[in-house]
Amino acid sequence: MSEQLLRVEDLSVHFALPTGFLGGHRPLKAVDGVSFTLAAGETLGIVGESGCGKSTLGRAILRLIEPTAGRVVWQGQPLGALAADALRGLRRDLQIVFQDPLAALDPRMTIGEIIAEPLVTHEPALGRAAIRARVEAIMAETGLLPQLINRYPHEFSGGQCQRVGIARAMILQPKLIVCDEPVSALDVSIQAQIVNLLMRLQASHGLAMLFISHDLAVVRHVSHRILVLYLGRLMELAECHDLLAAPRHPYTQALISAVPIPDPARERRKRRIVLTGELPSPLDPPSGCVFRTRCPHARPICAEQIPRIEPVRFGHSIACHRWQELPATPPAALA
Amino acid sequence: MPPLLAVQGLGIRFATPDGEVVAADQVDLTLAAGESLGIVGESGSGKTQLVLAMLGLLAKNGRATGSVRFQGEEILNLPAAALNRVRGVKIAMIFQDPMTSLNPYLKIRRQMTEVLVAHRGLDEPAARARCIALLEQVGIPDAARRIELYPHEFSGGMRQRVMIAIALLCQPDLLIADEPTTALDVTVQAQILDLLARLRAELGMALLLITHDLGVIAGACERVAVMYGGRIVEEAPIDALFAAPAHPYSRGLLGSMPRLDLAQPGELAAIPGQPPNLQALPAGCVYRPRCTFAFERCRSERPDLRAMLPDRRKACHLEHLP
Amino acid sequence: MSLALPDGSEQLLAIEGRSLWQDAWRRLLRNKAAIVAMILLAIIAAMAVLAPWLSPHPYDEIYWERIQAPPDFANQHWFGTDGNGRDLFVRTLYGARVSLMVGILATGVSLLIGVLYGATAGFLGGRIDSLMMRFVDFMYSMPFMFFVILLMVVFGRNIFLIFVALGAVEWLTMARIVRGQTLSVKRRDFIEAAHAAGVRKRKIITRHIIPNVLGPVIVYMTLTIPQVILTESFLSFLGLGVQEPLTSWGVLIAEGAQQMESAPWMLIFPASFLAVTLFCFNFLGDGLRDALDPKDR
């Protein structure tokens, strides 16, 4: 777990939204100044609510969206400096799994063709038999019967389609997989199968994973570290255990307390920190700290200055003006 | 005194070009006045079709059989005119996506006062005042101004609050909420669940909450019915169900959930297999193909939903789970 | 065959899956109107191809003794003869050859240009897209009849010119349809998945975009063929169509219309062939639309 695979430095993605008249534009700051590192074999969970920019962040790292500012350094090599062809070559190490399992598969292709596509693209010299053998091997590994190779996606259930998506991502033995809400579209019982599969694959192949989700419980289960995102900004980043046992950011604390626990006694006991209001529009984010409009601890300074990202201790960083004054209470949910 | 709502032997079938789809079969449920019951199930479990059938809202190719009594009166398959005396008046419903049930071209005021003018015979100023009071009650700040807005000018959570306010217009005895928080962020979900709990305490209405999320049920309901493949497989008070699920599926569902409050080293206890195909349900127990405890009898004989304790029922041939 | 999946479920296994095309075909075969339309079209097409063998009369032979004769089985003039004493049955079938060929070829040309053009514009997007589509708008605004008459005047009457003229107009709509479809397909996740896998743009267009926009294209194609046939008939009616002694349905109908009172068979037979063909293509198009996009039913 020591080799640093990916370094994201101050990454920003701003979209220019046309504002009607005269070709005027207004920036939508989907991701703003996010930094982190990822080691080989590590899972970093990225958690946040809708519109927090977590999917954009994942795509910007893979350069499916061009970042506006900042750098993505892959194995010491800045991706931004690469020519299109070199980047295409690198893609064999960087793969993605999507949220909607059926939509991510071309409905006109068979399962075998879909899974083989990255292989055919990166190893064009491979013969038919070799391709088929590789596809069948990865199908078996992802829990799909190799006999289903000539079936079409619409004949599969959501969970099976997600296995196909994972098989496609895995066939080139990548070093990093970005999982963008890979289980949110699935039923609870199927969700657990897919989570187990991803964790098993990660352990056996030494994959690094970026696990993007709105569901803190799932993220907690799969991640070594968790990054909390709000309106495109990093709020808190810590080891999984530290983040849950001693969250320092008021947003993280509220997020943890809002997750319903499948245990009636605990649900009755726990004190929820109910945030007032809702997510501000990312088109018009609050000045200073973006969370201040909903923060129970906001002070005038929070409206004036953007909080810097400061280390709480090694491996735990936070963007909050007042974290040192605020109590580091373990959330009631976990008591 | 009859229960507020009594569902007996409810079956729902859809005729499709590819054959008949059984969305629900032999569903029995009761709900007392003021009680809160959660129905939990995955997609295709029939939980949504169940309430649509009760309210006469099934798609054209759907047919419901059995009996649904509300305050002692049969309401299943009533003609629309008769149903409208109950629907929206004594039974109100809120949906996952409030945008589908709000008219995007009308101001909130029009959509709310209309109901009061039609059903309660109030005049416009009185109706307006009552609507503003209701909007304040569901936690919409500055309601007197916001009542003049259009639905799209509200955020998702606020829109759900507006829907709840509309549902409360005629002071219903029963509120049916179909996945009311699924489309919302978790911090907003917490707000809406708090609101529902508070309103129930204030107004004494019964709540039928339909969700896929056992966590939501744990915080919002007194009793829970677990549905699978169109059937109720277990029904119990929540504490009992969460402490010791009696049906293998309930246990599997609980085991499948990653939890924030517990460290679960290793793998989640996932349920193997795929959700049931409603067009070709297995003979015997619908859960049998995925059940780790299945034995010969499960293959041939369908288990009835029977009482284990006065307040607990399950549909399983096993006396006790190992 | 029933096998246990590694994840514990069981299901029936067919080794070959059914593609969306096969599904659509099965749905189409359940549509009676579409089947009847396909059978009729096949009969008309076969008759057109086999025309010289179906009648003892050549299409350009003039029988001076039988000018404008009514249908007559003794001389095997089943549809009668025209104003020049030529057998109408065989001429109607030769007309079918020209009309169907114009319809299919012009549509084929429009299909080829329209699909490539539309898919490229839609997929590349941005400024290139605007530029390409402005060109289409410009072409649209050209007065079509003027365009055709101009071509005729410059190059003389020529059947291939008709193909060119019709194809040149029909591809515009095809390009618009394909571009619209491409824009919606492009946003789907599987396209992004292909990008992420490092697939080249050209491959993405040919492998993913085009197969996924073909559904509406095929429907539009079956509706374009009758439209082209009709336009050709219209041009022939105006005297801008094929040259004697060759003929098309439009020419026959124009001649028949002039003799409507004295020799109604001259109008009735070619007009019924045209009408039946148009009906069939439209029914087939409707059937295909339902079959390819079952959500709309």
Image: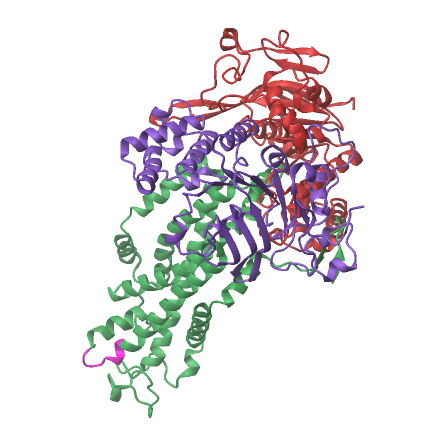
Colour given to chain B in the rendered image: purple
Q: Which residue, as the protein is rendered here, is positioned at the far front? A: B1
Looking at the image, is C87 positioned above or below residue A84? below
Looking at the image, is B11 positioned above or below residue A48? below
- Residue A289 in the figure: left or right of residue A88: left
Q: State the image coordinates of residue A225 (x, y, percent, origin top left).
A: 70, 23
- Residue C200 in the figure: left or right of residue A203: left
Q: Quadrant of residue C235?
A: bottom left
Q: Which residues are magenta?
A: C261-267
Residue at x 46%, y 24% (from the top left corner)? A281
Chain appearing in red on the rendered image: A
In front of the other: C211 or A265: A265
Q: State the image coordinates of residue B149 (x, y, percent, origin top left).
A: 35, 29
Looking at the image, is B53 positioned above or below residue C156? above
Residue A9 can be seen in this image: no
Residue at x 32%, y 63% (from the top left corner)? C230
In front of the other: C185 or B223: B223
Residue A223 can be seen in this image: yes
Q: State the image coordinates of residue C54 (x, y, percent, origin top left).
A: 42, 83
Colour given to chain C in the rendered image: green
Visual colour scheme: by chain
